[in-house]
Image (cartoon, grey):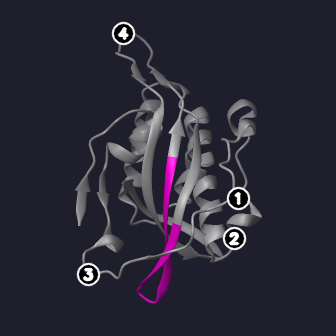
Amino acid sequence: MIVAVTRSRTVIAALCVVSVLALGACSGDDPEPRFAPPSTSAPTSPSTTAVSGLVEPTMPAAAKGSDAAAAEAFVRFYWEMVNYAQATGDLDGLQSLADASCAACREGTSYLERVFSDGGEISGGAATVRVRTTGFVKDQGRSNAVVVFDVSSTRQRVDYPGDRRDESYPGGVTRLSAILIPHAGTWLMSSWNDE
């Protein structure tokens, strides 16, 4: 199933919404995911070191494993990497967290590549994640995690050199659903879309 997503509030939301999402694990033939109780952990803030000191975030030990807590920690880390990529233009780490099947991931990083290759700079748009539910669904012998979460982002501006029209996005909250696949003791982002 392919879903076109049209909302666009921030560049973070643009990572979610200006793309065509391939949702292979969300077809009507798939079993219903089993959801764990809502996470009791507090939402994390974006990595201030990544944004202010321009140091690439490191995957936390909590994101390593195959349980709901590890999946949730991975989703938070993924968005720390989004914050870092927006602030620096260094997309390698973010791209390494995505499976080749993740169309939303490719579209999001392609957007950022275009901004930076055109000489643009991004200010604001820092995101925080609040996990709502996590479940698991079997697919091709794997137990994929399904994480539903809210991404809160601050107001953002994309400044281009010269007379090219700049872009501005209000801050806001977007509810997303992500499918993570197990990989090398942690996870890879397989798909995400807005709820």
What kind of residue is marked 3? Answer: Asp
Task: Report which residue position mark 4 lands on.
Answer: 163
Residue identifier under label 1: 59
Residue at position x 67%, y 42% from top? Answer: 45
- Chain-order first, disc 1 or disc 2: 1
Question: Which numbered circle lies on residue 29?
Answer: 3
Range of residues picked out in magenta: 134-150
Quadrant of image for the N terminus: bottom left
Residue at x 52%, y 54% (from the top left corner): 95
State yes or no: discs 1 and 2 in contact (Cβ < 8 Å).
yes
Label whose residue precedes the other's in the sequence (4 or 1):
1
Q: What kind of residue is marked 1?
A: Met
Task: Give the CA distance from mark 1 to mark 2.
Answer: 8 Å
Of label 3 and label 1, which has the lower sequence position?
3
How crowded pointer 4 is (Cα within 10 Å; few <14, some 14-19, many 20+) is rated as few
Mark 4 vs mark 2: in front:
2
Quarter location, residue 86? top right
Q: Which mark is residue 34?
A: none
Is the residue marked by circle 3 packed among few (<14), some (14-19), or many (20+) residues within 10 Å?
few
103 shown above or below 179: above
Does residue 50 sit above or below 106 in this rendering? above
In this rendering, the answer to whether 161 lies above or below 2 is: above
